[in-house]
Image (tube, helix red, strand yellow):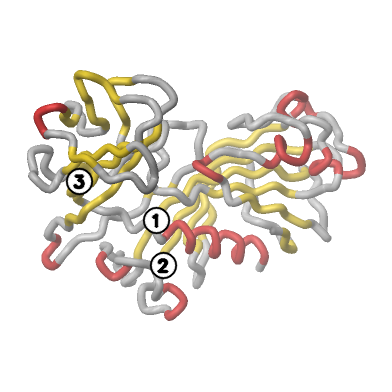
C-alpha cells in the first residue's frame, strides 16, 4: 500500500512527544532515531534515518466506522469517552525529506519487518541499519519512506525486536471479568513433551481455571479422522499456564486440539483500526 506523505509525524530529534487534536492519533512518542548505513547516501534520496517509538490512539466507540470492532463497547474509556491503545512504530525516511514523498506501509506479520527482505534482498532485521540488512537498497533509492506499526495484541511486550499493540481488556458490567472458550491446535514434526498455547513467543489467551472440566484436549490422525479425548490425567497446564505438558509426549503427525476456558480478552479488533488510522494520519 502506498500513499502520499506530508510531514508524517517525525518532527524533532531524540525523544519527542507530538500533540495532535481532533484525530484518532492522539500522541506520538519518538524514543529513538539514528542515521543508518553510517550516513551512506541512497541515490538522489540521500541518507536515511531510522525512527522508532510508539503511538497513542483514541477510538470513538460511537463512530459508525468502529462499530464492527468486537467488544469495543466493553473496553474502558478515557475522560473523553474514547478507547485508548498504544502501538509500537518504526520508520525509515530520507533525512532531507521529499516534498513529493511517498510511503510504503507494511502491515507487519507478528511484529516483524519483511520489506527489505522481500524487495531488496536484505534481511528481516528488527532495527535495519547495516548493508546486509538493506540489501540492494531499492526501496530507499526510490526515496520511499518505509513505515511499520504494531497491530497484534499478542506480540510479547517484553520483546523489543517486535512491534506490538497494547490493547485494553474487555470487561462485563461493573468491571466483571469476561470468560470464553478458546481453541489451540498443533501438528508437530517430532516428539515433544510441551506445547505452547500461543504461536512462538507470543502471548497466549489466559487460562481462566486450569482445573475446569471444560478444558478438553483431543487428538486425531487426520483432518477428517474422529477426535479422541486425551484423559485429563495424562496432561496438565504448565505452572505459568502458557503451555500444556504431557508426560508420555506428543506424537508427530497427529493433530492435537485444545479447547479451554479463557479470561480477560483483549479488544483484538483495535489492531485493524490502528492500521487504518496510522495510514490516514500519515497521509493527511
Residue at mark 2: 59
Q: Secondary structure at mark 1?
A: strand
Q: Nearer the viewer, residue 237 or 140?
A: 237
- SS for dot 3: strand
Which quarter of the rendered picture does the C terminus lie within? bottom right
Labelled pair 2, 1 in contact (Cβ < 8 Å) = yes
Question: Which residue is drawn at the image coordinates 82% and 59% (left, top)?
Answer: 99
274 sits to left or right of 8: left
Estimate the x, y position of residue 178 in percent, counting from the top left: 17, 58
Which residue corresponds to mark 1? 85
Task: Give 26 or 175, whichever is nearer the viewer.
Answer: 175
Residue 7 location, quadrant: bottom right
Point out the tag, 1 or 3, that comes first from the N-terminus.
1
Instruction: Select label 2 or label 3 by which is in front.
Output: 3
- Residue 244: x %, y % from top left: 23, 30
Q: Residue at 41% x, 21% y: name it.
A: 190
Q: CA distance from mark 2 to mark 1?
A: 8 Å
In the rendered view, does 6 fall on the left or right side of 260?
Answer: right
Amino acid at each position: 500500500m502506498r500513499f502520499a506523505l506530508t510531514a508524517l509525524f517525525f518532527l524533532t530529534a531524540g525523544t519527542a512527544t507530538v500533540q495532535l487534536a481532533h484525530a484518532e492519533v492522539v500522541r506520538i512518542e519518538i524514543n529513538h532515531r539514528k542515521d543508518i548505513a553510517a550516513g551512506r547516501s541512497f541515490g538522489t534520496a540521500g541518507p536515511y534515518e531510522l525512527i522508532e517509538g510508539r503511538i497513542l490512539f483514541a477510538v470513538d466507540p460511537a463512530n459508525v466506522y468502529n462499530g464492527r470492532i468486537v467488544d469495543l463497547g466493553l473496553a474502558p474509556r478515557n475522560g473523553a469517552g474514547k478507547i485508548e491503545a498504544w502501538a509500537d512504530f518504526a520508520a525509515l525516511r530520507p533525512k532531507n525529506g521529499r516534498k513529493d514523498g511517498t510511503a510504503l506501509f507494511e502491515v507487519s506479520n507478528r511484529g516483524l519487518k519483511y520489506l527489505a527482505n522481500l524487495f531488496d534482498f536484505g534481511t528481516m532485521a528488527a532495527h535495519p541499519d547495516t548493508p546486509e540488512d538493506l540489501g540492494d537498497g531499492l526501496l530507499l533509492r526510490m526515496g520511499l519512506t518505509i513505515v511499520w506499526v504494531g497491530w497484534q495484541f499478542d506480540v510479547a511486550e517484553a520483546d523489543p525486536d517486535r512491534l506490538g499493540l497494547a490493547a485494553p481488556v474487555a470487561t462485563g458490567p461493573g468491571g466483571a471479568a469476561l470468560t470464553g472458550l478458546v481453541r489451540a491446535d498443533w501438528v508437530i514434526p517430532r516428539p515433544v513433551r510441551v506445547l505452547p498455547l500461543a504461536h512462538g513467543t507470543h502471548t497466549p489467551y489466559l487460562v481462566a481455571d486450569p482445573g475446569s472440566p471444560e478444558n478438553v484436549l483431543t487428538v486425531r490422525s487426520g483432518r477428517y479422522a474422529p477426535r479422541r479425548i486425551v484423559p485429563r490425567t495424562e496432561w496438565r497446564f504448565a505452572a505459568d499456564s502458557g503451555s500444556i505438558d504431557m508426560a508420555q509426549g506428543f506424537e508427530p503427525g497427529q493433530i492435537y486440539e485444545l479447547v479451554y476456558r479463557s479470561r480477560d480478552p483483549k479488544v483484538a479488533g483495535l489492531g485493524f483500526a490502528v492500521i487504518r488510522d496510522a495510514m490516514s494520519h500519515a497521509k493527511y
